[in-house]
Amino acid sequence: MKRFVFLLCSALAWSGAWAENSTRVDGYTIHHNALTTDTLSPNVASAYQIQRSKGRGMVNISVIKNNEDRIGTPVSGKVTLSSRNLIGQKRDIPLREIRQGKAIYYIADFPVGHRERLVFDLEVMPEGSSYPLAASFQQEFFTD
């Protein structure tokens, strides 16, 4: 299972989605990426029961509590995700929590259409926090 983190990061880096896709808010960094699932290796997709397809999108989210060192500390919490397309249709996307040693990830997969641009809205309530954090990002998916 430790290979998941490496393989997922490799897939994201290969796909060009590993650019600085993060939001810093109130002492936390929320890392967020979206890609089509065909970029995942067959082993990773199988291990996490994700269908590999150009017609399926995937979101990967992690929440890091910033501290003095450069790495920060992964934290769990309640993470909710919704998407909306350019005409305003909204859909809630259920997330699954994945724990790999100290790393904590939230992932989801969902159908996407060619050239579909989605705006993702995140709400994160880190464990031990008294108020939620918000982040938003967008991704255009190419399925042809």
Image: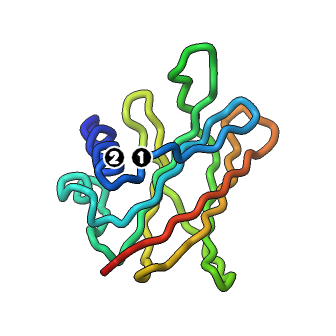
- Residue 119's label in the rendered image is none
Q: Which kind of residue does numbered mark 1 sit on?
A: Trp
Farthest right residue in view: 130
Q: Where does label 1 land, which residue? A: 18
Q: Which kind of residue does numbered mark 2 sit on?
A: Ala
User: At which x and y percent is residue 20?
Assistant: 51, 43
Left or right for 10, reference 69: left
> How far separated are the C-alphas under marks 1 and 2?
5 Å
Left or right for 39, reference 116: left
The image quadrant of residue 136 is: bottom right
Secondary structure state at the residue bearing disc 1: loop
Q: Where does label 2 land, which residue? A: 13
Q: Please tell me which residue lies in front, 137 or 109.
A: 137
The image quadrant of residue 121 is: bottom right
User: At which x and y percent is residue 93?
Assistant: 55, 67
User: At which x and y percent is residue 126?
Assistant: 67, 38
Which residue: 27% across, 66% down? 38
